[in-house]
Amino acid sequence: MALKPKRSEPKAKGTSRASKPRKSTAEAKSLPKAAAKAKPCAEAEHASAMAAYQLVDERIRVLGGWRAETLQAVRRLIHQADPNIMEECKWIKTSNPLGVPTWSHAGIVCTGEAYKQVVKLTFARGASLADPRGLFNSSLDGNTRRAIDIREGEALDAEAFEALIRAAVAQNLRSSGPKSEGRGQAQEQAIESSTDGGRPVKRKTKATTHDEYLAGLPHDKRTALERLRRTIQAAAPGAEECMSYELPAFRLGGKVLVLFGATAKQCSFYPGSGTAVEAYQGDLKGYGTSKGTIRFDADKPLPATLVLKIVKYRIAENAAQQQHAADGAARRR
């Protein structure tokens, strides 16, 4: 499939590599037993993630022809737009044993279906996304979804498509938390509300560091998120702090690992993976969850051992993605 070239962008600077966890903080001292238990689990999670990518590989291989080329090209653009996105095949059944390739980040972003005449890319929340280049050309009457139908020989605007993917991920992250009083989650993540003497105080500028973000929060939320921050550092000492989707995040190996933040009512931990939340659902009783999000009150923080397990899970997922990408590049040589 021909793709319209996008403008070249400067390559990101290299990031630090993960090293063995150091017992440099009080949090780290309390975690070694959990780390030992997490190792075999992480290996199983790595294998599971690899199986999901291989199933997508097989789905594309079986298609063959222009449809396989189109879906593979789209797949590459999706991962370029959001390196932290997860892919799998959903809706597997007897009539469709390989399922439908699906890409998710804090919820489904889009699916890729192959029909005789078109490859259809359906955005789960497409109706709420701005589409200035007019990529959406199907399912235009619905209140929720929108789709892009690509026919043989048609070109897809790569730059506009990647922008749509990033916008869809941002929409999922905004919608994954609870609505605040009088404002949507979208506004709350960009401008946090706190109280000072009973009067609301609004952050009018976007935070560019973790410290700036935390400084604008009420004391109880700041304390809870500082603790979460230290636990993540102990679990992934090689990860670097960054801001992603206007939230404090940690990046490892060039990919976002986890994020955290606060709304007017609660704190949130974003593993950035629905499978991570599902994997530890039994440990999350008493906490609010949705795909890719864990919500908790400042006076009931997440246990450090649970945060450790979730971060290790995400490290395994990212490693599986990177290995899969490397294997794919080697096969194409």
Image (cartoon, rainbow, N blue to C red):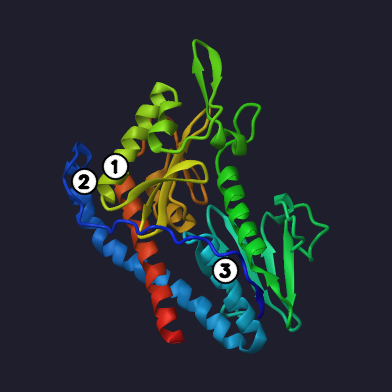
Label 3 or label 1, whichever lies nearer to me, is 3
Q: Are marks 2 and 1 in contact (CB under 8 Å)?
A: yes
Q: Residue 291: image x %, image y %?
A: 52, 51
In the rendered image, which residue does mark 1 sit on?
231
Quarter holding residue 157: bottom right
For the residues labelled 2 and 3, the Cα–Cα distance comes to 38 Å
Q: Is residue 64 left or right of residue 24?
A: right
Residue density around tag 2, few if under 14, some if 14–19, many if 20 or more, within 10 Å: many
Q: Secondary structure at mark 3?
A: helix
Q: Is residue 24 visible?
A: yes
In the rendered image, which residue does mark 2 sit on?
31
Of 203 and 273, nearer the camera is: 203
Residue type at numbered disc 2: Leu
Of 298 and 258, nearer the camera is: 258
Task: Decide which of tag 2 and tag 3 comes sooner along the chain.
Answer: 2
Residue plotted at (22% across, 53% down): 35
